[in-house]
Amino acid sequence: MKRDLKLREERDRELVRIYKEQLVFHFQHDEKLLRANVIKDVIKNGKPRYHVCFEYALRVLSLIKRNGDVPARMSIRRMMWYEILGHVDGLMQHHENYSLSDALAIVLRERRASQFFITTKYANKIIYEALHYNRLNRCA
């Protein structure tokens, strides 16, 4: 399974929490607020964890190393895999005794992503469902 449900729910909770924090920030600074702009800002500047399971990430990175390309159709996902690969390669160069799996485990555990690797439309759906249908057990 590409993403397990627990990681997806964790990502969704993190997205909604950061969205709510941004709303509070904008209200406190008495700024004009457009939901679409807040969501775009959250996606681009959220600094979430990488919400992929280790086994799947190891398979994808092994494929990339073997074939030289990311096996993802969506450009957003491709960006995520290249970002993870960059972190992993950096660790492996800095620590020559690290294997691919060692470096990947450290990246998934300790590094933050540069953004949420989802579309604005999907983020909007997640936030809408969380706020209007009480999904994610009252996230954040």
Image (cartoon, grey):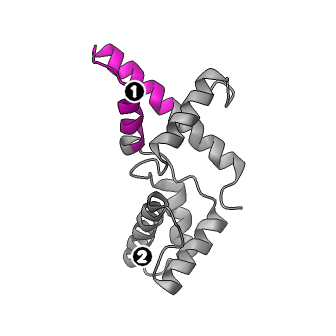
Q: Give the quarter of the figure containing the N terminus.
A: bottom right
User: Mark 1: which secondary structure?
Assistant: helix
Left or right of residue 76, residue 57 in this image? right
Q: Earlier in the sequence, mark 2 or mark 1?
A: 1
Residue 79 location, quadrant: bottom left
Q: Which residue is mark 2?
A: 95
**Quarter of the C terminus within the rendering:** top right
User: Which x, y percent locates residue 122?
Assistant: 53, 42
Q: Main secondary structure of the magenta part?
A: helix
Quadrant hosting residue 57 = bottom right
Q: Is residue 99 visible?
A: no
User: Is residue 41 or residue 106 the one in the foreground?
Assistant: 41
When the figure is inspected, residue 124 is found, relative to residue 105, above or below; the finding is above
Work out whether 29 lies above or below 13. above
Dot in front, 2 or 1: 1
Is 99 part of what is drawn in magenta?
A: no
Which of these two is toward me, 52 or 130? Answer: 130
Residue 114: horizontal and vertical position, in percent? 38, 51
From this viewpoint, which residue is outermost toward the bottom?
A: 66
Q: Which residue is mark 1?
A: 22
Q: Amino acid at mark 1?
A: Gln
The disc labelled 2 sits on which kind of residue?
Answer: His
- Which residue is rendered at x = 38% and y = 78% of the image? 93
At 70% from the left edge and 53% from the top edge, which residue is drawn?
4
Mark 2 burial class by Cα count in 10 Å: few <14, some 14-19, many 20+? few
Q: Is residue 114 left or right of residue 77?
A: left
Q: Secondary structure at mark 2?
A: loop
Residue 31 on the magenta segment? yes
Task: Give left or right: position of 50 versus 22.
Answer: right
Q: Residues within 10 Å of mark 1 (few under 14, many from 20)?
A: some
- Mark-to-mark CA distance, 2 and 1: 37 Å
Region of the chain picked out in magenta, as a range: 17-43
